[in-house]
């Protein structure tokens, strides 16, 4: 892919990053760069990174971004090995640095902490209460039946139906150790579902304490549309094909 296909967008938000209590990133001029299709990264002007950027001999092929030169990040006496990189061959990126998310202890947009990865300007979260009749079936057995769902709409993903536990056959669900993280919703925990002799691993999840923009799904249970059968007002939904299929 050539540099002409590089997708970027200016970010008007004030971005800060802290490590060991020290302000390391302080920028009002970040650039969103889509390194893949799901979400962008922040590319920071070099002058807005208040740490020493130490060149290494490591490089990688960044596709549309050109060759990436790996950098160590020195914050006082603390060295973050391979904490970032630059793409000097691409004019729009040559004076910017991309830092690994974990190189900072905390990141902020304005005065709001951001978790997991930068939030995309193209993603919006809507959680809407609904009285539609939702049934969830696994191997033909009804495992949830509710007219009190909260429907979460998120960008290109299918609508997700979050259901009260009192409307879910929780006796068929077994909590697992699996977890996932989302910058829009927070930290999810998972359940497997056992019907008859078959156990379907990690096909249901929930958020005990979601982030504020997704507060409407707190304590509810959701099932992967891609892996179960869902009926809405008596009509079966087709199973969508996504990265969760």
Image (spheres, rainbow, N blue to C red):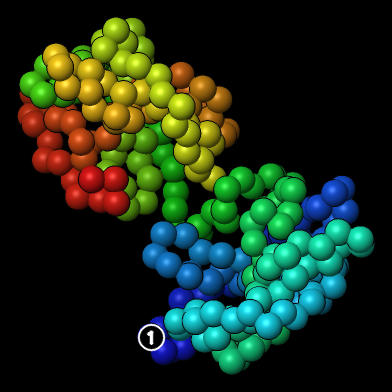
Q: Is residue 173 visible?
A: yes
Residue at 53 percent across and 71 percent down: it is 33
How many numbered discs? Answer: 1
Task: Return the x and y of residue 125 as percentages of the image width and height.
Answer: 44, 43
Q: Residues within 10 Å of mark 1 (few under 14, many from 20)?
A: few
Residue at 26 percent across and 12 percent down: it is 172
Relative height, residue 35 to residue 185 (above, below): below
Task: Place residue 151 in its image quadrant.
Answer: top left
Task: Return the x and y of residue 140 as percentages of the image width and height.
Answer: 8, 21
Q: Is residue 93 visible?
A: no
Residue at 17 percent across and 22 percent down: it is 198
Residue 56 in the figure: left or right of residue 1: right
Residue at 29 percent across and 51 percent down: it is 243
What SS does tag 1 mark?
Answer: loop
Residue in the foreground of this view, choosing between 51 and 216: 51
Task: Place residue 192 in its image quadrant.
Answer: top left
Task: Return the x and y of residue 225 as percentages of the image width and height.
Answer: 23, 36
Quadrant in the picture for the N terminus = bottom left
Task: Place residue 176 in its image quadrant.
Answer: top left
Quadrant in the picture for the C terminus = top left
Residue 81 in the figure: left or right of residue 8: right
Task: Return the x and y of residue 22 as percentages of the image width and height.
Answer: 88, 53
Relative height, residue 47 to residue 19 (above, below): below
Residue 83 in the figure: left or right of residue 233: right
Relative height, residue 177 to residue 64 (above, below): above
Residue in the foreground of this view, choosing between 196 and 128: 196
Residue at the disc numbered 1: 1
Relative height, residue 70 to residue 204 (above, below): below
């Amino acid at each position: 892919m050539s540099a002409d296909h590089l997708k970027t967008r200016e970010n008007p938000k004030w971005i800060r990053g802290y490590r060991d209590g020290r302000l390391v990133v302080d920028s009002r001029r970040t650039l969103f760069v889509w390194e893949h299709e799901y979400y962008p990264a922040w590319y920071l002007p070099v002058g807005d990174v208040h740490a020493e950027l130490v060149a290494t001999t490591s490089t990688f092929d960044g596709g549309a971004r050109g060759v990436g030169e790996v950098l160590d990040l020195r914050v006082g006496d603390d060295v973050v090995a391979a904490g970032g990189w630059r793409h000097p061959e691409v004019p729009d990126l040559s004076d910017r640095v991309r830092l690994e998310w974990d190189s900072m202890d905390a990141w902020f947009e304005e005065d709001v902490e951001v978790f997991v990865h930068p939030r995309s300007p193209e993603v919006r979260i809507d959680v809407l209460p609904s009285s539609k009749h939702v049934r969830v079936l696994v191997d033909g057995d009804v495992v949830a039946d509710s007219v009190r769902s909260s429907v979460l709409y998120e960008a290109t993903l299918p609508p997700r139906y979050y259901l009260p536990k009192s409307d879910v056959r929780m006796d068929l669900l077994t909590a697992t150790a699996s977890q996932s993280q989302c910058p829009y919703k927070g930290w999810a925990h998972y359940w497997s579902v056992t019907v008859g002799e078959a156990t379907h691993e990690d096909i249901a999840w929930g958020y005990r304490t979601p982030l504020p923009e997704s507060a409407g799904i707190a304590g509810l249970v959701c099932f992967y549309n891609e892996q179960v059968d869902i009926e809405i007002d008596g009509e079966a939904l087709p199973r969508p094909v996504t990265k969760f299929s």
